[in-house]
Image: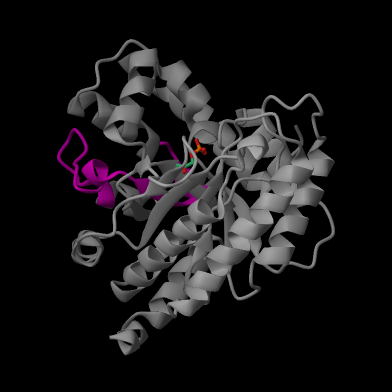
Amino acid sequence: SLNSLEKYADELVATANAMVRPGRGLLACDESTGTVGSRLESIGLENVEENRRDWRELLFRSPSLGDYVSGAILFEETLYQNAADGTPFVDVLKSQGVIPGIKVDTGLKPLVGGVEGETWCSGLDGLYDKCVLHYAKGARFAKWRTALRIDVAKGCPTDYAIDEAAHGLSRYARICQEAGLVPIVEPEILIDGDHDIATTARIQEVVVSRTYQKLKEVGCLLEGTLLKPSMTVAGVECSDKPTPEDVAKMTVQTLERSVPCSVPGITFLSGGLTEEDSSIFLNAINSIERKGPWAMTFSFSRANQSSALKAWAGKKENVEAAQKALLARAQANSEASEGKYVA
Ligand code: 13P
């Protein structure tokens, strides 16, 4: 029933705030089996469970990870998986002071009736029962990523795609809260394309506004949610490259126009930006004047992991170097979340 949210209300608010406490952000390592497989294959490893485990174990056992990272977003396999010595990953993370979270969407599907290439995000079937199990296993937050593509000439994203994205996010968020999981609401605006930053800002403002309209309609407790947006950047193929200050200004403007001040935190995705750009942009976002009250931090996957993966190269003797590479990014991003990163 709608009222049962009361059971978890205080806990949801406490969890969301702990996730975005000062100097902390999220380590996203919830790549699907296929996606993590292509990362592993890029360093010559086979996509088998043992290799996926070894890679995630390397990340989770990085010394003092909890100094920079408050939560880790896991794929379902990882939440229920054990480290090589049999310790559940959930316990490895907790001993680092890192809250386990879980990706609960089941991926993007073609949006029939939209423009070719548009997608919708699946995963609502059976979601409540799965969330109950994830909570019992130790997860305290969840993630659902929907993605919208900008192609102005083709009219993308269509209103239909935006509505479906907002609808899915709101249903997901409300269901998660019912089961005690803080929902991370992720409406990604893909960076593919040659559109300029003003176009991204205009479209993102509509997308994020509509998402919150729906979250409110279904009775979400906004104080117990987090937003995971893209930074407001130009399309990768746009010849007009915005400066970090442009990105910061436009990102803050977009979010101030669309995110309620009841939301405790905004945890950005990196979306294909380089590690260094992601840190520099986050730092610029946290260095300018703004009215928005939210914590603004990181929830990067690629921009936390890329150099660590290369340093590891799948070899035991490189584990320490890889962990150092991860911690270097995590520390940079932690500093950037407080506007203290010096590139
Ligand atoms: P990237 O930071 O690599 O875009 O991944 C974000 C994400 O949604 C993973 O949780």
Q: Is residue 257 left or right of residue 133?
A: right
Q: Say which residue appears at 71% left-offset and 34% top-offset.
A: 195
| Quadrant in the picture for residue 36 | top left
Q: Is residue 38 left or right of residue 201?
A: left
> Residue 11 in the image: x percent, y percent?
39, 76
Q: Residue at x 67, y 28 (%)?
A: 236
Query: Is 173 placed above or below 91 here?
Result: below
Q: Which region shows up in magenta?
A: 62-90
x, y percent for residue 89: 25, 45
**Looking at the image, residue 237 lies above or below residue 66:** above
246 with respect to 43 (left or right) = right
Q: Nearer the viewer, residue 174 or 301?
A: 174
Name the residue furthest top: 44
Assess whether residue 82 is covered by the magenta stretch.
yes
Q: Image height check: is 111 above or below 310?
A: below
Q: Is residue 301 magenta?
A: no
x 47%, y 75%: residue: 13
Give the quarter of the figure containing the N terminus.
Answer: bottom left
Front residue (pair 335, 103): 103
Q: Quadrant of residue 54?
A: top left
| Count of all numbered marks drawn on residues in the image | 0
